[in-house]
Image (cartoon, grey):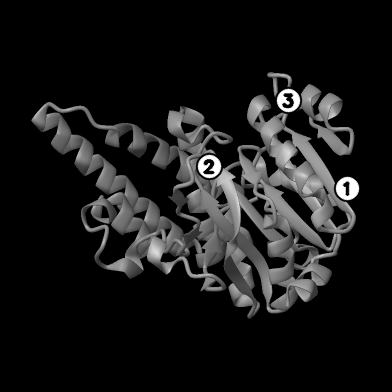
Amino acid sequence: MVTRLWTRARMSVDVIVVSYNTRDLLRACLRSVARAANEVDNLRVFVVDNASGDGSTDIARNEFSSVQLVPLDENIGFGPANNRGIRVGNGAYLLFLNSDAEVTPGALKTLVSFLDANPDCVIAGPRLEYPDGRFQLSCRRFPTFLRSLWNTAGLQRRFPNQFTSLQSWLSEADHAHGAKVDMVSGACFLARRDYFDSIGGFDENLFLYEEEMDVMLPARRKGKNVCYCAEARVMHHHGASSGEHQASDASLFHRYRSKYYTFRKHYGPLTAWLTFTTDLWVFRISAGLNRIRGSASPAGRNAEFCLRGYRAARTLSNK
């Protein structure tokens, strides 16, 4: 059995790492990939750099001779940068790996073997772990109007173990090896190139966020599967590559723009409008109540970027 899986894993894989100002994390990421080079045939690694200013390109160029660097003149976003990596490679499988993630020994071989053994599965995601080895949530349900309302209203935090169908993330207990899931984390996943060709790659209108929904929802509609592969382990410094912890104005804007754009694209303009409207009023009501109480709240700021994001999403969709 082990021999058969090893033989099946000998396939060509293009590893695509999008880099943006994560120099030291990028070095660790590429070292982990280099250690996995003998797990598949014809492993090629592409670092697409979004105009980093911290010397990330020097790391890729000078310390990893087998890496092909694709330097960009400006930050074009996560999905569009991945598309640049897809275009320069030719591997049958595509491993999308965040620069703040590291593959553990055997993870790449296991993911390839899993896809090879499951022809109806077009994307497989690994078990993500924090640097200290703790389990990290790796699979999500597709966002919907009701799930959005549940989360925006704060009910997801109040009832974390109830109404599970409305929770965005699957619980740790639901992360079963080989399970068919809606989405796996974009931090690391292996995909079939022919599937990505069939959907046209990443949507270039998405600068950041919601890429998983956009590329994995079509699989469900095509009768294909997205699966969780618990036996493949990947260490992930959560949020380091996107700056999630900082909640900058730019990240908030793109969070809402991407949300309403993908809702409009996949569910239609009415659902996008209803989702935006309920988000906006939940934020406004929350901001008003907190003003009365005299307590600080991010709700007013969220309402502002919610409105900006919806207007930008509508403009994108109408192009």
Which mark is first along the chain, 2 or 1?
Answer: 1
Q: Residue at left 85%, top 38%?
A: 67
Assess disc 3: are there few (<14), some (14-19) or many (≥20) residues with their C-alpha within 10 Å of its C-alpha: many
Image spot of residue 26 (x, y percent): 69, 32
Location of mark 3 (residue): 56
Assess disc 1: are there few (<14), some (14-19) or many (≥20) residues with their C-alpha within 10 Å of its C-alpha: few
Q: Gap in Å between the C-alphas at discs 3 and 2?
A: 31 Å
Residue placed furthest toward the left: 293
Q: As drawn, is 188 to the left or to the right of 284?
A: right
Q: As drawn, is 72 to the left or to the right of 110?
A: right
Location of mark 1 (residue): 88
Q: Gap in Å between the C-alphas at discs 3 and 1?
A: 20 Å
Q: Which mark is residue 312?
A: 2
Mark nearest the camera among 1 and 2 is: 1
Image spot of residue 186 (x, y percent): 59, 52
Which mark is first along the chain, 2 or 3?
Answer: 3
